[in-house]
Structures are given as structure tokens and as C-alpha cells.
Image (spheres, rainbow, N blue to C red):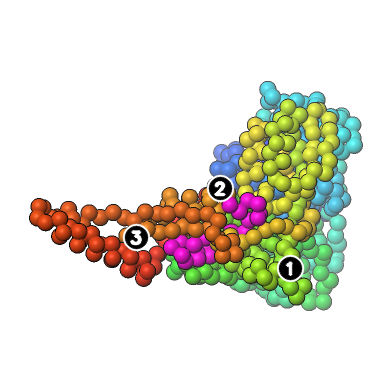
């Protein structure tokens, strides 16, 4: 155990974690040069396309320092705020972390957030400054920021270029010298903490584990303490980063166990695997609380069971995803899914398409509201369809967050103007070293879940960054806005909005519907309504058909009769007709 080092790399998004991991893989000869490719541990095509790490990825490396052989277990982690739960689980499985900072950007919001998570786990922190070879590098300024943040001397910070490999071996040596060996007892009964999982059709659920005590071999029986599920170990091994079979896993190691359990819901992240039922469970993870919800419906209703199966298997890889059944008259059966943010929702829907071939209709992300009714009972509102009648509502509450934005002072004006539009409360501002300002605001969560991050990057040319944490629920002046198509309420288009913004929101929705809804044989009214009162309206004109075109010459009364008959037919059709809205209309409306 004293020759094992378990560590991860943490940083803000796009600061070079995966590139640094690449250099570690090369130095330790874990991956042959002919097989090496950039961001090797980003195994999903989606990660490479977006240039971000989405899923944490463990890898086992071997390294010799001072004639002594070491096993290095590295976990590459995401940097975006939406995937912070992945980071927290990684930190619970290791003893140390490399805190990586981009020399061209310095300290950013998620740098601080991830550092706080690491400190809570009492991890050894190794500070490193990356991209020192870049012409835009502000090495000394960034070092000052990092030294100030960690309360250390600048000389303790490693200056590296992950791209060129400069000083990377020094960081690897520091991992061995500064991070302690894992704690645990190989003589105690076997216990391991599950920090991730995936599904295999032959071996069942494969659990990613950190072994705390004892050892495990293939063929032994296991017990999942929280789920009270029993399994037969089909295989054990470690990550290279692909699965590498081994004879056993022992105390201090990070590896995988093929549980043989074919029911995905029984293997949960944070559960303890043991050999005996009486074992004491390990401290698990704090359950993530999704605050952003969206509805997912298969475009083809026959794919419902496939969607259900896909979500169950995807949850094994993404423990922060939640889902439950819901149905709508116009869309059929689907699932209301909970996410940690709008990017998380986008990634999940994209993975469902790529990994399972599912084409989906996805509602616009929204937050969960809380209503106190006249009987003082709390009701959680996950979608507009759950909204009660206004006469039943005593108080409406919505989630608020503490928003922290770090920006260079040259973009301070534009960033402040953007934040003012959020209708929040200013808390404080502080000057960081190297001419950076930290703004802290309290804002409604609904204001930042869609579009705000992109707008922040746009006004600051990519230099500003954000992080947020949920404060709780506060009273809000909100209403449910309903959309009527030809007088019929279409619940799928309903939306919960700020009362002051209702007219603008309603106008925007009916105008958008007018653009994309196919014309009918009669005029169709599109209306936005609040508590039965129409606040916005647009009309789609009737399809025109020239019924008198075939007539040539003759008395005009013949033409008049045809026109009158057409008019009566359209009137009758309008009263009896039922508009069927195509699926693509829902898709375009939800994406707008």
C-alpha cells in the first residue's frame, strides 16, 4: 500500500487537465506512442467535439522513482460547474489532487469551487501553472493569484507546459513524494466504495471501486449493503484505461468489479461492497439535488421502452441524473428528468441519441418551484402541468442561488450590465490580485440556467467565469402562462414566468408558433393566457384555394355560390376541426 498513490487533477474547464494526463500516460509508458492521441482519457466522441471532460476517467500507471516502483491511480475529472458531482466522487476516492491553473487566464470560478471540495476531503494539494509556453501567458501574475489563494510561496508552484511536457516529470515526482499512501487495512474483511459504474450485457453492472479494506477475487460472493443485493464476482481488474483483468484487488487500490447483477437500479454510487452482510458501510456521497428539469419524449412513441432502458443504463454512468415517468396527451409517454444544469441536460440528450439511437422531443429546461396552498401544504412543481389553480395558491417560492463571477477589470462594465438583467441582489465585490474582480450576487436560478453562461463568455471574450451554489427557496411573483391553439389549451407549450415579463414572453411564444405551425384550411388563433385572461394573440391565415379557377365565363352568380359554399365549409370545419400539431413543431418550440 505504501507504493500506491491515488490522485486526481482538478481545475476550471479548459485549463488543460486532459492534456496533462496525456503527458503522464506517455512518461509512464502506459499507452504506447503509436496508440497515443490527444485527450486520450476523453473516451467519448462528444467530449472531443466539445473540448471538455464530461465523465471522470480512472487510469492506472506504473512509475519508477529513485529505483522504487510505484502504482499511480489517476482520475481525470470534469471542470464545468454542471459536472461538479463527478468531481466530488473522484475526490472521495483519492488522497491528493493536482490543482491546475491556466497561465493565460489565471484563477477562475471553478478553480475555487473545486479547491473547496478538495479541502473538505483533507486532500494534499499540489499547485501547478499550465500553458507557460503560450504567448498570452501571464505567468508571474497567475502565480501570485495561486499563491494568494493557497496561502503559499510562489516557489512552491510548479510551472508546466502540458502540451510540450515541460516540468511534467517534476509534478509526477511531487505526487509520489507529497501525497501519502492510501489508508486501509488489508487484514480486515473486504469493503470497497462504489464511485462509478457501467453496464455490460454479459457481466452485468461493472462497479468502479476504491478498495478500503481486505481483498477480492473473481468467483467470490458479494453484498451491496445499502441495496441489500447479492452478486457473484465475474471479474476484477483495473483501468489501463480500458479494463485490464487481474487476479485480485486489495486494500488501497482503485479498480473495477464485474458484479454479475443484471438489474441496473441495484448498483448505486456511494454504496459499499462487502463479502459479509454484517460489515459496516462506508461513508457514501451526498446525494446530488437536481434543480433543473426537462421532459424527454421519444419522437417515435414505440421507442418508449427503449428510452426507459437507456435512461436506466445511462444513470449507471451518470449518478446525478434522475428521471420519473410522465405523460402528456399530445406527446404520449415520456420521462421528467432532473439535471444539475442546462449543459448537463444537453449532454444527456446527445448521449441518448448517439449511444442508443434515440431521437427525442425535449422540453425547455426549467427549475423546480414550491407552492404553499391554502391548507399550508407544500407542493413541488416540476412542470407547468403540475401548477394548481390560482385560488388554491397561498404563496409561490422559487430556488435562488449565490452567483459568483470572476472577471478581468477591463470587462467589468459589460459583465455588470449583464448581471443587472438577472433581477437579483448585489451581495459584494472584491478585488483579486492581478486586476481581477469577484462579484457575488443572489439571483433566481431560472435566470441563469439557459443562456447566461454563453452570454457571460461573449461579453468578456471568454475571460470571465462563473460558479453558483443553491441558497434555498424564496417567495416569487410567478404565474402560469397557457398557450391556446384555435381555442384549445396545449399544455406542452405552457410556461411558468415572472408576472412582469408575462406579456413579452407570451408575445414571443405566439409569434414563434405563427412562424412554424402549418397553415390550416381555416384561420387559427394563437393566444397566450393567464388565469383565463388573454395577454397576447397572433393569427395564422387560412390556406387559400381558388375554387372559381375552373370556371370560365358565365354568370357571376355561379362563382358567388361557390365562394359562399367555401365560406360555410370553412366555418363548419373551424367548429368541428381538430388541429394535429406535428412533432417537429414541439421540437422547434422547445429549442427556441
Residue placed under numbered mark 1 in the picture: 394
Alpha carbon distance from label 1 to label 3:
42 Å
The local crowd at label 1, few if under 14, some if 14 to 19, many if 20 or more residues have their Cα within 10 Å, is few
Say which quarter of the image contains residue 234. bottom right
Q: Position of residue 374 (x, y in %)?
A: 74, 73
Q: Quadrant of residue 258?
A: bottom right
Q: Which residue is mark 2?
A: 46
Asked whether, in this view, residue 590 is left or right of residue 100, the answer is left
What secondary structure is found at the residue carrying circle 1? Answer: strand
In this view, the mark in front (2 or 3)? 3
Residue displayed at 62% across by 41% down? 454
Residue 316 makes an appearance in the image: no
Q: Is residue 22 left or right of residue 285?
A: left
Residue 565 sits in which quadrant?
bottom left
If you read the primary sequence from the N terminus, does the residue marked by circle 2 or circle 3 appear first? Answer: 2
Q: Which residues are magenta?
A: 483-503
Q: Most extreme residue toward the top, as rendered?
A: 135
Q: Label 3's element?
A: loop
- Left or right placement of residue 580 versus residue 468 in this view: left
Residue 114, horizontal then vertical, whole percent: 78, 46
CA–CA distance between discs 2 and 3? 45 Å
What residue is rendered at 79% in x and 68% in y?
190
Q: Earlier in the sequence, mark 1 or mark 2?
A: 2
Amino acid at each position: 500500500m505504501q507504493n500506491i498513490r491515488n490522485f486526481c487533477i482538478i481545475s476550471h474547464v479548459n485549463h488543460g487537465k486532459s492534456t496533462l494526463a496525456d503527458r503522464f500516460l506517455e512518461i509512464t509508458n502506459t499507452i504506447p506512442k503509436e496508440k497515443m492521441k490527444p485527450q486520450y482519457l476523453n473516451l467519448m466522441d462528444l467530449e472531443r467535439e466539445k473540448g471538455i471532460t464530461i465523465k471522470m476517467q480512472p487510469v492506472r500507471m506504473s512509475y519508477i522513482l529513485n529505483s522504487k516502483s510505484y502504482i499511480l491511480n489517476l482520475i481525470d475529472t470534469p471542470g464545468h460547474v454542471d459536472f461538479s458531482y463527478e468531481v466530488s466522487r473522484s475526490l472521495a476516492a483519492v488522497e491528493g489532487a493536482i490543482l491546475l491553473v491556466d497561465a493565460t487566464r489565471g484563477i477562475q470560478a471553478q478553480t475555487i469551487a473545486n479547491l473547496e471540495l478538495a479541502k473538505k476531503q483533507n486532500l494534499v494539494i499540489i499547485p501547478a501553472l499550465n500553458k507557460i509556453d503560450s504567448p498570452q501567458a501571464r505567468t508571474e501574475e497567475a502565480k501570485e493569484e495561486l499563491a494568494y489563494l493557497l496561502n503559499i510561496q510562489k516557489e512552491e508552484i510548479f510551472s508546466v507546459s502540458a502540451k510540450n511536457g515541460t516540468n511534467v516529470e517534476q509534478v509526477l515526482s511531487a505526487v509520489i513524494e507529497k501525497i501519502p499512501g492510501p489508508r486501509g487495512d488489508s487484514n480486515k474483511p473486504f469493503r470497497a466504495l462504489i464511485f462509478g459504474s457501467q453496464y455490460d450485457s454479459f457481466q452485468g453492472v461493472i462497479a468502479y471501486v476504491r478498495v478500503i479494506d481486505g481483498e477480492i477475487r473473481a468467483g467470490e460472493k458479494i453484498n451491496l449493503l445499502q441495496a441489500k443485493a447479492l452478486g457473484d464476482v465475474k471479474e476484477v481488474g483495473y483501468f489501463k484505461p480500458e479494463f485490464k483483468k487481474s487476479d485480485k484487488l486489495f486494500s488501497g487500490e482503485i479498480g473495477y468489479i464485474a458484479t454479475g447483477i443484471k438489474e441496473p437500479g441495484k448498483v448505486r454510487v456511494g454504496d459499499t461492497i462487502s463479502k459479509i452482510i454484517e460489515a459496516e458501510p462506508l461513508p457514501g456521497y451526498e446525494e446530488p439535488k437536481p434543480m433543473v428539469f426537462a421532459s424527454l419524449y421519444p419522437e417515435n412513441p414505440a421507442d418508449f421502452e427503449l428510452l426507459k432502458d437507456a435512461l436506466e443504463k445511462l444513470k449507471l454512468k451518470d449518478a446525478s441524473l434522475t428521471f420519473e415517468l410522465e405523460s402528456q396527451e399530445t406527446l404520449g409517454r415520456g420521462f421528467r428528468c432532473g439535471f444539475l444544469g442546462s449543459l448537463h441536460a444537453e449532454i444527456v440528450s446527445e448521449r441518448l441519441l448517439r449511444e442508443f439511437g434515440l431521437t427525442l422531443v425535449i422540453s425547455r429546461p426549467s427549475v423546480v418551484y414550491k407552492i404553499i396552498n391554502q391548507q399550508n401544504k407544500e407542493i413541488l412543481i416540476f412542470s407547468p402541468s403540475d401548477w394548481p389553480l390560482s385560488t388554491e395558491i397561498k404563496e409561490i417560492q422559487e430556488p435562488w442561488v449565490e452567483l459568483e463571477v470572476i472577471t478581468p477589470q477591463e470587462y467589468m462594465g459589460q459583465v455588470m450590465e449583464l448581471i443587472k438583467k438577472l433581477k437579483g441582489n448585489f451581495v459584494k465585490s472584491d478585488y483579486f490580485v492581478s486586476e481581477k474582480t469577484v462579484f457575488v450576487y443572489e439571483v433566481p436560478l431560472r435566470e441563469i440556467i439557459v443562456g447566461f453562461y454563453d452570454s457571460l463568455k461573449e461579453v468578456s471574450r471568454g475571460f470571465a467565469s462563473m460558479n453558483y451554489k443553491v441558497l434555498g427557496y424564496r417567495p416569487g411573483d410567478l404565474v402560469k402562462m397557457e398557450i391556446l391553439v384555435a381555442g384549445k389549451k396545449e399544455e406542452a407549450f405552457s410556461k411558468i414566468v415572472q408576472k412582469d415579463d408575462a406579456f413579452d414572453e407570451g408575445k414571443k411564444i405566439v409569434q414563434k408558433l405563427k412562424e412554424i405551425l402549418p397553415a390550416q384550411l381555416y384561420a387559427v388563433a394563437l393566444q397566450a393566457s393567464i388565469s383565463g385572461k388573454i395577454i397576447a394573440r397572433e393569427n395564422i391565415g387560412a390556406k387559400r384555394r381558388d375554387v372559381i379557377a375552373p370556371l370560365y365565363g358565365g354568370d357571376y352568380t355561379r362563382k358567388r355560390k361557390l365562394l359562399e359554399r367555401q365560406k360555410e365549409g370553412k366555418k363548419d370545419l373551424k367548429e368541428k376541426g381538430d388541429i394535429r400539431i406535428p412533432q417537429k413543431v414541439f421540437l422547434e418550440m422547445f429549442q427556441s
